[in-house]
Image (spheres, rainbow, N blue to C red):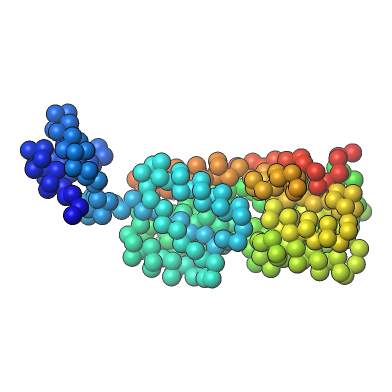
Amino acid sequence: MAVTLKDVALRAGVSRSAVSRTFTKGASVSPMTRQKVETAANELGYTPSALASALSTGRTKLIGLVSNNFHNPVFLEVFDLFTRGLQNRELRPLLVNLTDSNDPEASVRMLRQYSVDGVIVASSTLRPSFAKAFKNAGMPVVHSFGRRMAVADVHTVGIDNVDCGRMAARSLLARGYARVAFLGGPATATSTQDRQAGFLAELAQHPHIAVTSSFAAGYAFEAGRAEMQRLLAEGPPAEAYFCGDDVLSIGALSAVRDAGLLVPGDVGILGLNDMEMAGWANINLTTIHQPIQDIINASIELVVATMAQPDRDPEVRIFPCRIIERGTLRPAL
């Protein structure tokens, strides 16, 4: 049978409340009592019950981690960093997969059932109103990789996707490309909309540059490959593509190479994220680096701070990006 708090109390010769205080962070207990309890617990192999702790403190230490793009390999990195970051703060992530549904009310109901202490919405495609549904339900919430807004309703941490689109356009202009294209993810995704808007706005200042836009069905390898195959079947490709996401870029790269074209000799490709796979020797993708670790650290910091101060004003933290030079664009002139 499992060792109980009562067993430890009897072995240590102390009250059950003394055992409970010993294993409650910040609770008052004398050094002598602590030593007795810890010695007894070690001898008996006792592990404090998280459920019992939640019942006594009113805190589950559960953080709902909500996302909707499990087909994109970059989110393996994101989830790894989030789960380790939360666990390092003695918090426990509860993963919610929205791949087949993006109804905020259903997610709110589920996370209420688990009495989560906070919520992190980790998505660059969901609208800000999704995260706001958790705030309206009284849950501390942070929208990680969220859309930059002039006035935010919830804490938002991420990058300026419009500025990244401008950065991509300037990079292609600096390399002398005259026929360029935007190949985005789903047209309904906020990240796609903002990256395209920045890209087109920058190129509008250079009317001699021919520019087109198209959209893949999702942020996934097969979606990027299929869209590039469609474009190649319609006619000559653009000289360079800003794909708006690394996994789309890798799919597009595969289609270009299968068509017998050289990268960057015939077609240039620029991605966004700088996920680990982008640096593999057989991919070697030139991309825009998104500071994922910084975004995750700030998101965890904000959700913890909001748990302690639920009425704090919404904060927006935007991190700068930069071009990572590799081998899928020709050198700047």
* Residue appearing at x 69%, y 52% in the figure: 246
Q: Residue 129: image x %, image y %?
A: 52, 63
Compare residues 198 and 279 and report the one nearer the observer. 279
Q: Residue 13: image x %, image y %?
A: 7, 38
In the displayed structure, does residue 3 sit left or right of residue 50?
A: left
Q: Is residue 77 visible?
A: yes
In the displayed structure, does residue 33 sit left or right of residue 254?
A: left
Q: Residue 202: image x %, image y %?
A: 79, 50
Q: Residue 265: image x %, image y %?
A: 90, 49
Determine whether 322 is above or below 228 in the image.
Answer: above
* Residue appearing at x 69%, y 60% in the figure: 221
Determine whether 102 is above or below 322 in the image.
Answer: below
Compare residues 155 and 86 and report the one nearer the observer. 86
Determine whether 174 is above or below 51 in the image.
Answer: above
Quadrant location, the C terminus: top right
Quadrant location, the N terminus: bottom left
* Residue appearing at x 34%, y 61% in the figure: 114
In the displayed structure, does residue 143 sit left or right of residue 94?
A: right
Q: How many discs mark residues in the rendered view?
A: 0
* Residue appearing at x 41%, y 53% in the figure: 93
Compare residues 45 and 112 and report the one nearer the observer. 45
Compare residues 97 and 182 and report the one nearer the observer. 97
Q: Is residue 156 visible?
A: no
